Image (tube, rainbow, N blue to C red):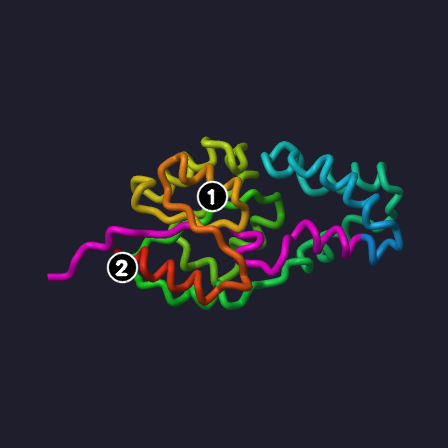
Amino acid sequence: MTREQQHHVAFDWGGVFTIGTFDGRSTQNMADRSGLDVEKIRESYFRHIRQMEVGAWTLPQFWETMQQETGITLPYAEFEPLYLGSIADNLPMYATLAAIPAGVRVGLLSNNYPVVSDHLQRDPRFGRFDALVFSNEIGHKKPASEAFAALEQKMGLPAAQVAFVDDVQENIDAANAFGFHGILYHHDAHEQFEQELKNWLQG
C-alpha cells in the first residue's frame, strides 16, 4: 500500500525562480534604455511599487507616475516588453520544479505585479503549480500573515505540512511564525537546497 504524501512545498518567485531580483534588473534596464541615472529611477520605482504589489495600481498607472517623477519619455508600449524582458530565469529551480513527484502539492506565494503575474501564469512551466497566490490579486504582501493565510487556504493543507521556500529571511521568519516549514534559498547553493527539499518531502 502506497503511503500518503505528508509533506508538500510552496515557493516564492523573485530570487528563487529568477537570478537576482526582478526589481533590480528591471530598473537597471530602464536606466540603460533612457540614459537616466539608475538611482533616480529606483527612487521613484521603490517609492510606488507597493501600490502594484497590493493591486491598487495597474502597470500603466505606475509607469505614468514614474514618467512624471523621473522625466523618462519611453512610451508604455515600449516599457511593458522591456519590463517583462527583465525576468532572468533560474533554470535549475525550474528543473527542480518539474522533477517534484506527482503526489506532492506545489504552491507559489509571490509579491508580484499586474501584467507580470499574468505573464507568469501563461508560462507552461507554471502548470506544475497546484496553487498560485499573487499579492496583487489578494491585496496583501509578504511578510503579512494574511498572505500566508491565503497560501494555506489555496494549498488546501495545514501549514505544518508545507515547506515555504524564499530568498528573504524576513519572509522565512514570517512563514515559520505562521506554521510553515521555512527554507531559505540562494541560487549559489542550489544543490544543498535540493537535498534539503528531498529530505523534507521524504519525511
Amino acid type of the residue that numbered disc 2 sits on in the rendered structure: Gln
In percent of the image, x 63 and y 57: which residue is there? 20
Left/right placement of residue 62 relative to residue 149 reads right
Secondary structure at badge 1 equals helix
- Determine which residue is flagged by label 2: 202
Q: Residues within 10 Å of mark 1 (few under 14, many from 20)?
A: many
Quadrant where the C terminus sits is bottom left
As for residue 8 lying within the magenta part, the answer is: yes
Q: In the rendered view, would you say 71 is above or below 193?
A: above
Q: In the rendered view, would you say 189 is above or below 158?
A: below
- Determine which residue is flagged by label 1: 172
Of callouts 2 and 1, which one flags the residue occurring earlier in the amino acid sequence?
1
Name the quadrant containing residue 69. Answer: top right
Pick the residue in front: 112 or 145.
145
As for residue 201 lying within the magenta part, the answer is: no
Magenta region: 1-30
Left/right placement of residue 48 relative to residue 175 reads right
Name the quadrant containing residue 102. Answer: bottom left
Amino acid type of the residue that numbered disc 1 sits on in the rendered structure: Ile
Give the image location of residue 146, x and y in percent.
46, 31
